[in-house]
Each structure stands twice: as structure tokens, then as C-alpha cells.
Image (tube, helix red, strand yellow):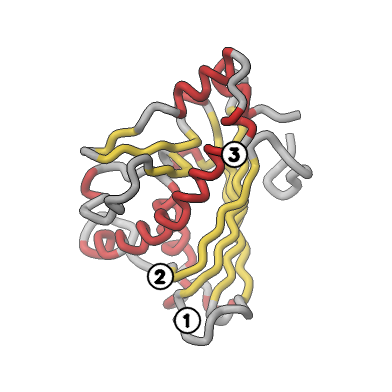
């Protein structure tokens, strides 16, 4: 099995997500600091939503429903995940017995030597990113931030516990706008989904 560092030319479920904007360092625990980071989580989540929606609409794993197995997978994917009155659709779900590998390039607008200080507090910034990739866990995480014009909101993950591998590499963003602050980043997120084990419902996610 290929590792996260040596992906092949194309796998059954491999794609890239991107984000360009602020990624500040904020607290991870529930409380005032966590509530303060919700707008940043939603800014990233809103940027990722149309990209995930495009994967749903165009990827062969979802557009081909010629077998009972692919129809079974789509039946699960087509079930909304309700969080209060809001509904979400995630690709990586526990019912599909999937795991998710992420390989993230972070182009930062500060000196690389400062990745654990101030704007470069890497641990907290990554946690903010991972929170943005998943479905909100409770109505308190929505709190009026969800756009009212989106009916079927798409996320990568049902829950971030489905992440089985995470690789982070930072680079200096030499193309950052002159007006960008120190918390501005460019993210390139390589995603690979594959079964934890072969099951009837996850055949579309298998690869050689």
C-alpha cells in the first residue's frame, strides 16, 4: 500500500483542495477563544464547500452508479447529516468504513523560523483547518455562521477522527498580496480516501 509520501499518478479517490486567506492561531478548547475562531473556521469551510460539491458532481466514484455496490455507496452519501436544523453532506463517513490521508502544503506570510510563535502557531492553526474540513459537531458550532443561500452544504469529513495520516510542510508565500497580514496562508490540501477494509459499500473508493 502506498504511503502518504509516495502517492501514485492517480488513485480512485484522490483530489486537491485549496484555500487562500487568513488562518489565525486561536484556542482549541471550548470557551471564549474557541467561539472566537468560529468565523475563521467558517471562512475556510465556505471556501472548501464548492470544491467538495464539485467532487460530488464530477468524480467517477460518484457519477457512476452502474453496480449495486456503487448505488449502495451513493445511498449512504446521499443521506444528510443533521446538525440542529442544518443539513450537511460529507464524503468521508464512518458507514463507508473509510480513512482519510491529508498532505498539506502551507504557504505562509511570515518567516519560516516562527512557525511555533505568534501568527505561526502551527498546532492551533492546523486544528482550525481540521475543524473546517469536518461537519459541525453541534448546533453551537453553527451559531448563525452558515450561509443561508446554501441548501446542501458539503464537507470533506463527517468527523476528523477519520483522518489516518497527516503531513504538513511550510513554505514562504512569495506571492502573498502586499496588503496580506502575517496570518495569511495559501493551502494546498492533497486528499486521499481509501477503505479501512473492503466492504460492499466502499468498492468505489478502492484502487489498485
Question: Residue at the spot x=58%, y=28% of the render?
Answer: 196
Along the line of sight, which residue is nearer the eye, 164 or 184?
184
Identify the mark at residue 54; answer none if there is no mark.
Answer: none
Whether residue 87 is situated above or below residue 106 in the rendered picture: above
- Quick one: which residue is furthest to the bottom in this view? 178
Query: Residues at badges 2 and 1 in contact (C-beta under 8 Å)?
Result: no
Cα separation, mark 3 vs mark 2, equals 32 Å
Along the line of sight, which residue is nearer the eye, 170 or 173?
173
Question: Residue at the spot x=30%, y=53% of the render?
Answer: 147
Q: Earlier in the sequence, mark 2 or mark 1?
A: 2
Identify the element where label 1 is drawn: loop
Q: Which residue is mark 1?
A: 180
Cα separation, mark 1 vs mark 3, equals 33 Å
Identify the element where label 3 is drawn: helix
Q: Earlier in the sequence, mark 3 or mark 2?
A: 2
Identify the mark at residue 58; answer none if there is no mark.
Answer: 3
Q: Which residue is mark 2?
A: 24
Amino acid at each position: 500500500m502506498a504511503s502518504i509520501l509516495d502517492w501514485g499518478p492517480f488513485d480512485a479517490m484522490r483530489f486537491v483542495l485549496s484555500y487562500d486567506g487568513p488562518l489565525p492561531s486561536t484556542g482549541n478548547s471550548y470557551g471564549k477563544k474557541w467561539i472566537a475562531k468560529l468565523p475563521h473556521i467558517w471562512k475556510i469551510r465556505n471556501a472548501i464547500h464548492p470544491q467538495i460539491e464539485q467532487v460530488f458532481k464530477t468524480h467517477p466514484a460518484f457519477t457512476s452508479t452502474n453496480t449495486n455496490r456503487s448505488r449502495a455507496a451513493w445511498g449512504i452519501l446521499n443521506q444528510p447529516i443533521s446538525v440542529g436544523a442544518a443539513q450537511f453532506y460529507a464524503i468521508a463517513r464512518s458507514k463507508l468504513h473509510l480513512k482519510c490521508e491529508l498532505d498539506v502544503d502551507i504557504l505562509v506570510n511570515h518567516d519560516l523560523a516562527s512557525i511555533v510563535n505568534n501568527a505561526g502557531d502551527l498546532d492551533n492553526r492546523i486544528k482550525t483547518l481540521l475543524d473546517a474540513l469536518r461537519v459541525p459537531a453541534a448546533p453551537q458550532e453553527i451559531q448563525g455562521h452558515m450561509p443561508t443561500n446554501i441548501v446542501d452544504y458539503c464537507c470533506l469529513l463527517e468527523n476528523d477522527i477519520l483522518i489516518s495520516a497527516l503531513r504538513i510542510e511550510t513554505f514562504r508565500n512569495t506571492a502573498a498580496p502586499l496588503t496580506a497580514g502575517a496570518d495569511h496562508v495559501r493551502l494546498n490540501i492533497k486528499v486521499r480516501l481509501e477503505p479501512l477494509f473492503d466492504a460492499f459499500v466502499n468498492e468505489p473508493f478502492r484502487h489498485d
